[in-house]
Image (tube, coloured by chain):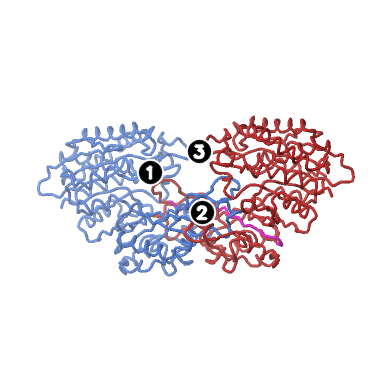
Chain colours: A red, B blue
Amino acid sequence: MSSLSAIAFARQNHPRFLEELKALLRIPSVSTLPEHAGDCHFAAEVLAAELSRIGMENVRLIETAGHPLVYADWLHAEGKPTVLTYGHYDVQPPDPVDEWHTPPFEPVERDGNLYARGAVDDKGQVYMHVKALESLLMTRGSLPLNVRVLLEGEEEIGGEGIAGFVASKPPELKADFALISDTEMFAPGLPTLCVGLRGMIYTEIEVRGAHTDLHSGMYGGAAPNPFFALAQILARLKDEHGHILIPGFYEDIIPPSPEELQAWHSLPFDEEHYRISEVGARQLVGEAGFSVLERTWARPTLDVHGIPGGFTGAGAKTVIPAKAQAKVSMRLVPGMTPAKAFAQYKSYVEKIVPPGVDVEVRLIHSGDPCLIPVNNPYIQAATRALHEVWKKDTVFIRSGGSIPIVGDFAQHLGIPSVMMGFGLPDDNLHAPNEKFHLKNFELGIESLILFLEEAAR
Amino acid sequence: MSSLSAIAFARQNHPRFLEELKALLRIPSVSTLPEHAGDCHFAAEVLAAELSRIGMENVRLIETAGHPLVYADWLHAEGKPTVLTYGHYDVQPPDPVDEWHTPPFEPVERDGNLYARGAVDDKGQVYMHVKALESLLMTRGSLPLNVRVLLEGEEEIGGEGIAGFVASKPPELKADFALISDTEMFAPGLPTLCVGLRGMIYTEIEVRGAHTDLHSGMYGGAAPNPFFALAQILARLKDEHGHILIPGFYEDIIPPSPEELQAWHSLPFDEEHYRISEVGARQLVGEAGFSVLERTWARPTLDVHGIPGGFTGAGAKTVIPAKAQAKVSMRLVPGMTPAKAFAQYKSYVEKIVPPGVDVEVRLIHSGDPCLIPVNNPYIQAATRALHEVWKKDTVFIRSGGSIPIVGDFAQHLGIPSVMMGFGLPDDNLHAPNEKFHLKNFELGIESLILFLEEAAR
């Protein structure tokens, strides 16, 4: 059978696909809340059962220390490449619940969107994969290439289980490329592939002064103040123009190509609209001479997330705390490595410690930046499929965030990831009233069907 | 009868005085813990009953929104001055309890000390007042001057109740001077009067960036980071040498006189010993050119107590918080006023706000610095009494902390305070194994008896 019939099948069955997705969205598989552990397991079972039903093989749950992985494969396309499709069935907590217009776990269609926690992140997108596979299997009795499906239930809480599994390089994950639908389109109707992610190092700085908390009246003026020392250190990490002051920090950066910059420049992006509607701050900040897209996609940054310790209650307590801590992370861009960046940072912080205090710099976790060449044949196949469905040229974007599984696939399995997502910028990920645009669910399935066929060529 | 017989009475009754004090110390009158509200009330009742028993008049509890005040008077010394004696019956929580060698509320005599929570701060010192009055009343049938006793049960939690009462200028508090025993001797055996206290302003700086918490991957490099902005602000409040950078901050300071500085220089104080045993830091900090005593007694300081907000849990969360706060206080010295200092500080902070954020500077509370001239007749009377008992000249010290009631007495009642305390520097105030040196309890009562007689001349 031809791809047209798989697409015809998908179109014909769209109402059923949507009802099935709603059933999946009704399962409150909130991975971070222990009371929902049963729901997470149930969501995994539902997906495994559906993968079996559509004809996938070797379907099983792989237990981890946390929520289980779901595995399935179909490996009968001899001589064809193998794709590893990835997604996650766990969702963020729905809080604050009272800001939802309809209950988070009662999916509702409204104004061309499907509202529910997990609608776009990532159950709706996972389900597009399943339904693309079903459409192909039901209409042609086979798949155009070999497929391995791997789903996890801990993406929202760090993905430890899948990371361990991938690092063990199991034969079940041998593939030529990965397909991930957990990103978004740059604008409605604009087919988008994400080809770059920033890496990161997440650190803690601990500063210790006196051997115990002291009274600021008695000792103020003689005892070192770790919070003040920390402020002095932090203020010397980045200048007022957003330039990171760690020596050598920028030296290995591979800047975007002139063509990539030109392409970003052509994207429909308005900095003032972004400032007002997305950030809501008096003014955007960052390095002069770089656009917002460059600053968030292709430049390293340094952020402080919190400064625990000391007195944080209401009112006043006159203490000079014995120690202070800061949570500091840096985003890294292609060319940089977490190990070198951390060593540069640690050595610099240790050099600028103010008198009277001791400092310890700790690495909490890290991830490599990644960049997928746009001339990769699977990226090229994806653009052809997307053009067929959306009638537009694909835009290649990057993301300022990190998707650790992409780095894990690259490092342990040696495969690139095609990040083909169908979310929209206003889908309210991790926020109340999360939604998925129904047209994107429909056209996403068609895009995926065509992509699997194109990738098999 | 002569003062000798009052002192003889005190010496003879010392064992009983000590047993009575132990009974008072067994009451866990921890003012900050709601479950001990009944104990606080009971401690007030016990003291009121004892004041009645020894012959004080008009004894009563004055209820407040919190724990009650205890009032008593004896006003039959016509033509003589009136002293207002102050103390507090509440104590700090005993935590960490497992660091006590004996239980905090089971007083134990060991090595010439009495160990218990409240032994020196302030039940033991309050009880010296009561026993000095008893010794005088029991031996001469009268007091050498008019006495009003005012005790509170909220000193450790801010003293709101007494502050309101004093501010109302009630006729019960009309007096010529106050007597407070809630300070310490500079060294064992060295009679000490505290004649200066630093004032303070306690403030919060709130910095707001984006309208909501943002993902640091997506927005890092474009969205303002309130914690980083706060670090930049804090780092500009004080230079690396401890000099406060607020314009005009030092302009009204009245420095200690050359005689006072000379006297401080003669005190038995070793900076290296202080660094190691009291502070326990790698190095002391503060303004160059000033000794530790000058820096902690006679120079303004600025301390950061905590930086609430943001992510403070274990591990990593990649958030750019929408806002950050800092608790910042400044100690003020004679010549400075809280109102002017706060205005200078607020205006400076508002000038140095980094781009992209909004700032709000709030005053939480404040207190005036105070300095009592050593030629005050009651101070002079105190030195004569102390010399008689301790056979040494009194040293005049200041305290870097604030005792708000001293400012309240000065402001609302127009009276100076004689701060004659008998604690020792190693008495572990607010810490495990609080103690009171038994010899100081004994000689303190004798000093107070003689002081009341000297003050009546």
Q: Which residue is mark 2?
A: A277
Measured from the top left, where is residue B38 in percent x and y?
34, 31
Location of residue A358 in the rendering, given as x and y in whole percent from the top left corner? 56, 58
Residue at 27% over, 52% down: B406
Q: Residue furthest left?
A: B78
Q: Residues within 10 Å of mark 2 (few under 14, many from 20)?
A: few
Please identify, in this view, whether the residue under mark 2 or under mark 1 is nearer the observer. 2
Relative placement, left or right, of B344 versus A81 is: left
Magenta residues span A319-335
Q: Give x and y (percent) for residue B276.
A: 50, 56
Q: Note whether A128 is above or below B195 in the view shown.
A: above
- When the figure is inspected, residue B394 is found, relative to residue A259, above or below; the finding is above
Amino acid on which the number 2 mark rests in the picture? Ser
In the rendered image, which quarter is residue A16 located in?
Answer: top right
Secondary structure at numbered mark 3: loop
The secondary element bearing badge 1 is classed as strand
- Disc 3 marks a residue whose amino acid type is His
Disc 3 is attached to a residue of which chain?
Answer: A
Q: CA distance from mark 2 to mark 3?
A: 20 Å
Q: Is residue A254 magenta?
A: no
Is disc 2 placed on a helix, strand or loop? helix
Q: Residues within 10 Å of mark 1 (few under 14, many from 20)?
A: many
Q: Residue A170 sits in which quadrant?
A: top right
